[in-house]
């Protein structure tokens, strides 16, 4: 997921860093800090809270400056995790014994591999796009994520769900604009990022905006894979419409974005 808790804090070397590292990315983090490249990185505690894709994003430039190799990031969930189906009501995924149901907006549609075929329109799985294919100006400062701050009560579940639903739709469209359709987070991950940041006294909208600016800068100089895996959604119960042109599907561990093809 694209979420960087503790982004503004500065990492410092800790002799117990390697002892607590549980992955190649965490070990690389320790090496970067040990060699003096930790300025701008979050603390180890905050670093561990991030998805591996974001950990790799955070380490990319410091590792490059130190001529260190960034390990390959798996797109599948960590061993032992149990991905669950996200609901069609834009709520964090919960365990359910009920049969999968199709969102009303997708009634009559069929999932056919990399396509979702609906009665009058077809949607195609979107990957990451090349830099040359992006629209003019999307990487310039004027293109901002633009998620507004949350001004309700965090104990008001309906207010939180309504806010995050609108914010998530905007986030997906903005990620597509910079050609990162294969790097989006699920709604559950988005919801968890909101709760973690806001509970820590960090403005969710501001932090997400900062991360979006970082992604734009990286897009100017760094290449991306079109896709990171060959897995596909199992059925349409995993899917939700963003607008008439975009459908998002996820199993919590993996997010897929389908874009109107005709």
Image: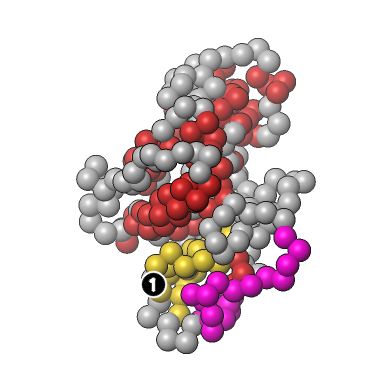
Q: Position of residue 207 (x, y in %)?
A: 41, 35
In this rendering, the answer to whether 205 lies above or below 106 is above
Q: Position of residue 228 (x, y in %)?
A: 56, 56
| Residue beneath the point at 56% across and 64% down | 88
> Is 18 or 87 nearer to us in this picture?
87
Left or right: residue 152 compared with residue 25 = left
Left or right: residue 148 compared with residue 86 = left
* Residue 168 visible here: no
Left or right: residue 162 compared with residue 110 = left
Q: How is the image coloured?
A: secondary structure
Circle 1 SS class: loop
Binning the other alpha carbons within 10 Å of mark 1 as few (below 14), some (14 to 19) or many (20 upward) gives few
Left or right: residue 115 compared with residue 23 = left
| Residue beneath the point at 23% across and 52% down | 137
* Residue 159 visible here: yes
Residue sitting at the far bottom:
119
| Residue beneath the point at 58% across and 77% down | 111
Q: Position of residue 215 (x, y in %)?
A: 39, 43
Magenta stretch in the rendered image: 96-117
Tell whether position 110 is magenta: yes
> Is 232 or 89 nearer to us in this picture?
89
Q: Position of residue 44 (x, y in %)?
A: 59, 24
Tell whether position 55 is magenta: no
| Residue beneath the point at 59% across and 74% down | 102
> Is 83 or 224 nearer to us in this picture?
83
Name the image quarter holding the C terminus: bottom left
**Residue at mark 1:** 244
């Amino acid at each position: 997921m694209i979420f960087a808790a503790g982004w503004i804090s500065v990492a410092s070397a800790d002799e117990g860093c390697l002892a607590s590292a549980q992955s190649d990315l965490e070990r690389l983090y320790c090496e970067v800090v040990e060699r003096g490249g930790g300025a701008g990185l979050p603390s180890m505690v905050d670093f561990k809270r991030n998805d591996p894709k974001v950990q790799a994003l955070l380490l990319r430039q410091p590792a490059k400056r130190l001529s260190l190799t960034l390990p390959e990031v798996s797109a599948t969930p960590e061993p032992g995790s149990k991905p669950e189906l996200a609901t069609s009501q834009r709520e964090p995924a919960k365990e359910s014994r009920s049969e999968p149901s199709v969102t009303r907006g997708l009634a009559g549609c069929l999932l056919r591999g990399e396509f979702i075929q609906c009665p009058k329109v077809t949607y195609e799985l979107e990957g990451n796009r090349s830099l040359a294919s992006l629209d003019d100006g999307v990487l310039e400062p004027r293109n901002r994520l633009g998620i507004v701050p949350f001004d309700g009560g965090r104990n008001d579940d309906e207010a939180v769900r309504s806010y995050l639903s609108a914010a998530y739709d905007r986030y997906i469209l903005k990620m597509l604009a910079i050609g990162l359709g294969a790097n989006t987070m699920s709604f559950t991950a988005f919801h968890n990022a909101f709760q973690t940041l806001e509970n820590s006294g960090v403005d969710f909208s501001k932090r997400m905006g900062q991360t979006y600016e970082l992604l734009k800068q990286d897009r100017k100089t760094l290449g991306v894979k079109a896709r990171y895996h060959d897995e596909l959604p199992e059925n349409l119960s995993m899917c939700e419409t963003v607008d008439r042109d975009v459908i998002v599907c996820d199993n919590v561990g993996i997010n897929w974005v389908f874009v109107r093809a005709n």
